Image: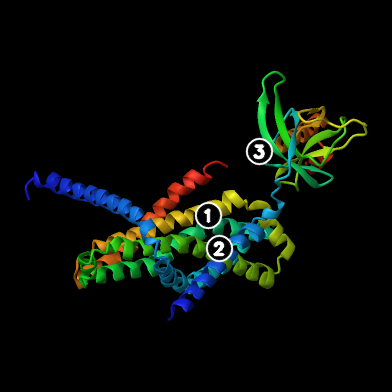
């Protein structure tokens, strides 16, 4: 085999390998959604952040507008302090509200931002005042059981006897 | 055997292991040092990439396809039980990019390329070619070992990526074409759950580490083999055993470092 043939084959091999890495990055991991846009921070205090994680998406109208940058415990108000990095091209009115939602019934949790109607926009570092905490499934079940118990024995159970 | 001989035998064994470790570490430093000079004749490295990388391509691609097919079939069985068959793509892509791609590629690489490296170096030594080079003031580490070492490090990540890619495509064939999972769901769930740096990037880092380990072990064992037919045969066997075990242990250490945090 000549030198040139060897070099060509090695070149093809390297190109194929690079293509495979590109495939993994773009098709399997979606590098394209990776955003390098400038962002600004917004804060929100939740009574319960549930299963929210650093890196969870922040969505408005279902579109990802940013990511959760950090989650910490505020020892003054005893709430979870969530810092979100919002892309700079999106502005929200000062009376916007934030809530922690779940994708699907048991999916990952994300922050949903509903825009308000004020003329002024939230500035970097501002806190979103109106918040709604994560729905904890256990609490929900507990409430259902509690209200059932408060109603007393239901008709169905009495009929069975 | 007297009682005192038992600890003596144990101590002799331990000393031998430590001596091998120290000797191989010295060999590794020498190999890394001679790498820049070895790269000066880059064609030698290219020829080795051809021998190591190109020729391993078919076995890597075939194994990747087989693993992807089986993963998709088995994964579908379990996931469909929970009504999550659409996450098949995510499951296959994560397991391939994080673990199976790098580890299986390294094991195949040790069997396919590592053995041939060991046998080649061992026979060169048995034929006194290496000694002849030294006589001509040519450092065999620069001329023979360094190009093979670099070629192994170049080839492994590329082969690992090809393995994962072929595996994912094979899973696509089983999942979407044969079973009939929605193609959009298959890709979007995968893209949602696989992180470029955390999963794909760490997988590539793993393959680089395995590439260094397997090629180094193959070269060291070949270089230190006894210059007899039995010595070369033993060395090839040792290469497979030692590289496979080191790959598996290194994988555990790397996984613990990379993925222990959720």
Which residue does the numbered mark 1 point to in the structure image? Answer: B203
Q: For the residues tagged 3 and 2, is the chain the same?
A: no
Which residue does the numbered mark 2 point to in the structure image? Answer: B164
Which residue does the numbered mark 3 point to in the structure image? Answer: A54
Label 1 CA crowd tier, 10 Å (few <14, some 14–19, many 20+): many
Residue B171 screen position, x and y as percent: 61, 67
Q: Specify the subunit that label 2 lies on.
A: B
Label 2 secondary element: helix
| The one of A42 and B153 positioned closer to us in this rendering | B153
Residue A68 screen position, x and y as percent: 70, 38
Q: Specify the subunit that label 1 lies on.
A: B
Label 3 secondary element: loop
What distance separates the C-alpha of mark 3 from that of mark 1? 22 Å
| The one of A61 and A104 positioned closer to us in this rendering | A61
- Describe residue B104's horizontal placement relative to residue B96 as left or right: left
CB under 8 Å between discs 2 and 1: yes
Does residue B103 appear in the picture of this structure?
yes
Q: Residue furthest top?
A: A76
Q: Residue furthest left?
A: B2
Which is nearer the N-term, disc 2 or disc 1?
Answer: 2
- Which quadrant: the C terminus of chain B? top right
Q: Is residue A90 above or below residue B90?
A: above
Q: Is residue A133 above or below residue B196?
A: above
Label 1 secondary element: helix
């Amino acid at each position: 085999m000549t030198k040139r043939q060897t070099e060509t084959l090695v070149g093809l091999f390297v190109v194929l390998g690079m293509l495979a890495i590109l495939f993994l990055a773009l098709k399997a991991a979606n590098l394209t959604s990776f955003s390098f846009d400038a962002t600004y921070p917004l804060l929100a205090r939740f009574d319960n952040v549930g299963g929210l994680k650093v890196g969870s998406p922040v969505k408005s109208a279902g579109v990802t507008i940013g990511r959760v940058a950090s989650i910490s415990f505020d020892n003054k108000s005893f709430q979870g302090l969530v810092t979100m990095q919002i892309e700079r091209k999106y502005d929200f009115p000062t009376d916007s509200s934030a809530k922690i939602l779940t994708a699907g019934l048991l999916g990952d949790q994300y922050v949903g931002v509903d825009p308000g109607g004020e003329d002024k926009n939230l500035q970097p570092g501002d806190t979103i005042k109106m918040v709604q905490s994560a729905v904890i499934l256990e609490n929900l079940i507990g409430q259902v059981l509690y209200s059932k118990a408060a109603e007393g024995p239901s008709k169905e159970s009495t009929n069975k006897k | 055997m007297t009682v005192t001989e038992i600890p003596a035998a144990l101590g002799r064994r331990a000393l031998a292991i430590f001596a091998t470790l120290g000797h191989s570490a010295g060999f590794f430093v020498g190999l890394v040092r001679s790498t820049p000079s070895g790269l000066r004749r880059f064609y030698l490295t290219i020829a080795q990439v051809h021998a190591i990388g190109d020729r391993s391509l078919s076995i890597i691609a075939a194994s990747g396809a087989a693993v992807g097919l089986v993963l998709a079939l088995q994964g579908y069985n379990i996931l469909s039980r929970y009504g999550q068959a659409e996450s098949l793509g995510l499951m296959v892509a994560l397991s391939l990019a994080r673990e199976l791609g790098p580890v299986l590629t390294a094991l195949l690489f040790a069997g396919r390329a590592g053995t041939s490296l060991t046998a080649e170096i061992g026979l060169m030594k048995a034929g006194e070619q290496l000694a002849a080079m030294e006589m001509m003031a040519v450092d065999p580490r620069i001329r023979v070992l360094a190009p093979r070492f670099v070629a192994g490090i170049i080839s492994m990540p590329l082969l690992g990526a090809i393995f994962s890619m072929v595996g994912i495509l094979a899973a696509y064939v089983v999942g979407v074409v044969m079973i009939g999972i929605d193609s959009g769901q298959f890709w979007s769930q995968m893209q949602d759950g696989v992180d470029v740096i955390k999963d794909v990037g760490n997988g590539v880092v793993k393959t680089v580490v395995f590439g260094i380990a397997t090629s180094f072990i193959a070269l060291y064992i070949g270089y230190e083999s006894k210059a007899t037919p039995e010595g070369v045969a033993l060395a090839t066997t040792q290469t497979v055993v030692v590289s496979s075990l080191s790959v598996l242990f290194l994988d555990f250490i790397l996984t613990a470092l990379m993925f222990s945090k959720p």
